[in-house]
Image (cartoon, helix red, strand yellow):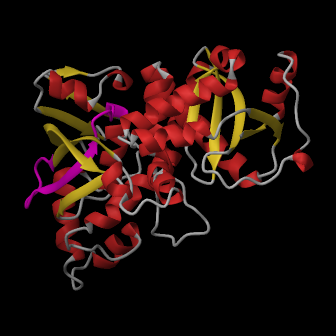
């Protein structure tokens, strides 16, 4: 049996459909994986959807409202089956999971932490739904990607896990990494004009769109996304970053694109797009494979200003050293950045970035 802990917004809808609710004190604890779900109803990008998050795996499903209204059980089974198939979960295991849903029971919510996570996820879903327009693709993205971005309070701080990994762990599978895989693409970033060249080699999901890529660049370069940016493909400026994914570029044979950030300092990165490959993703979807030399700070004054900044910061006897350090706020580490640390930041800063972009978009619409 699956139990759906619905928000008042969704419960009000189900009452109109004639669905009866079970008082929460009459709902007994269940041990089966994927039994308990927290759900709400939303209108996103003109689409009416039900968003469900499982406790404790955080597996999240987005289901069209009309499919859910017709049969909550069938709609959830269909959405989850597609996700499990995409990630090569064995057929026997998939059938066993879906078989636990002999019926669906609706009750009220009783977990503030799950509702809090669900609210964070809603921003991400709206952002992706605007681009992808398909809930199937979003469900796959959610399993592999988003929850590596949300810190789990009962785990060590460094342990950010995807829902896919949580699911495998809950099922007591010995090698979860070998079960969950998805296509990725390598992106080599080189900051033009810097000597020695500042560069990053990053492995990203093939479905990463250009706005996702922008956020990844900002994190890799330790910038704060305070200035305008643009992508240039085949000498043309890209105006709709939602609509172009890395996989699209590979299929079109595009191997190099330019990224401009901060039209004052004018940082230009050349991005080399590698081929498509498969890998295992037990601990998150974004990986920095190589990081060469520290990136320039924000507002340092372009390539020339960065060179002067490095010269001053590396010489404590320089007359401007104290002033430069006070401006930067700390000493400047000239060693190569740690790829693992950047990979960790790539995960958990994305939600904040997504929420900021959603807020900016909503302001524009107002």
In the depicted view, which residue is nearer to us: 178 or 317? 178
**Which image quarter: residue 259?**
top left
In the depicted view, which residue is nearer to us: 208 or 222? 208
Q: Which quadrant, please, contains the N terminus?
A: top right
Kindly identify the residue that appears in the image at 22 percent across and 64 percent down: 294
* 119 over 159 or under it: above or below: above
What x and y, as percent, mark residue 134?
47, 20
* 37 over 174 or under it: above or below: above
**Which image quarter: residue 12?**
top right
Q: Is residue 126 among what the camera can see?
A: no
Q: Is residue 205 magenta?
A: yes
Kindly identify the residue that appears in the image at 60 percent across and 14 percent down: 46
Q: Is residue 333 among what the camera can see?
A: yes
Kindly give the residue lying farthest to the left in the view shown. Answer: 196
> What stretch of residues is rendered in magenta?
190-211
Kindly give the residue lying farthest to the bottom in the view shown. Answer: 317
Kindly identify the residue that appears in the image at 80 percent across and 34 percent down: 106
Marks counted in the figure total 0
Q: Is residue 234 magenta?
A: no
What x and y, as percent, mark residue 25?
91, 50
In the depicted view, which residue is nearer to us: 297 or 158? 158
Left or right of 309, for residue 329: right
What x and y, as percent, mark residue 172?
49, 61
Kindly identify the residue that appears in the image at 12 percent across and 26 percent down: 254
Q: Which quadrant, please, contains the C terminus?
A: top right
**Which image quarter: residue 332?**
bottom left
What x and y, as percent, mark residue 331?
33, 77
* 61 over 241 or under it: above or below: below
């Amino acid at each position: 049996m699956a139990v759906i802990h619905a928000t008042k917004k969704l419960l009000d809808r189900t009452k109109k459909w004639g669905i009866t609710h079970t008082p929460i004190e009459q709902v007994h604890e269940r041990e089966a994986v994927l039994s308990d779900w927290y759900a709400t109803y939303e209108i996103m990008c003109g689409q009416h959807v039900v968003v469900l998050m499982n406790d404790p795996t955080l597996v999240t499903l987005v289901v069209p409202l009309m499919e859910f209204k017709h049969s909550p059980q069938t709609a959830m089974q269909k959405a989850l089956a597609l996700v499990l198939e995409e990630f090569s979960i064995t057929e026997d295991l998939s059938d066993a999971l879906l078989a636990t849903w002999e019926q669906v029971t609706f009750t009220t919510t009783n977990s503030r932490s799950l509702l809090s996570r669900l609210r964070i996820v809603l921003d991400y879903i709206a952002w992706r739904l605007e681009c992808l327009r398909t809930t199937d693709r979003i469900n796959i993205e959610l399993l592999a990607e988003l929850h590596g971005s949300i810190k789990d309070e009962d785990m060590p701080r460094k342990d950010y896990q995807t829902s896919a990994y949580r699911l495998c762990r809950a099922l007591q599978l010995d090698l979860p990494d070998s079960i969950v895989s998805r296509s990725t693409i390598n992106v080599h970033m080189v900051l033009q004009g810097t000597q020695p060249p500042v560069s990053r080699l990053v492995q990203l999901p093939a479905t990463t769109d250009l706005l996702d890529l922008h956020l990844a660049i900002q994190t890799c370069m330790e910038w704060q996304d305070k200035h305008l940016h643009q992508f240039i493909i085949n000498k043309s400026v890209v105006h709709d970053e939602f609509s172009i994914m890395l996989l699209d570029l590979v299929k079109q044979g595009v191997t190099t694109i330019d990224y401009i950030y901060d039209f004052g300092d004018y940082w230009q990165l050349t991005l080399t797009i590698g081929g498509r490959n498969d890998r295992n993703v037990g601990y998150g979807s974004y990986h920095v494979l190589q990081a060469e030399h520290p990136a320039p700070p924000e507002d340092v004054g372009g390539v020339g200003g960065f060179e002067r900044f490095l010269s001053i910061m590396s010489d404590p006897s320089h007359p401007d050293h104290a002033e430069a350090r006070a401006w930067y706020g700390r000493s400047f580490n000239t060693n190569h950045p740690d790829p693992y640390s950047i990979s960790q930041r790539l995960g958990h800063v994305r939600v904040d970035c997504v929420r900021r972009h959603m807020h900016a978009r909503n302001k524009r619409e107002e």
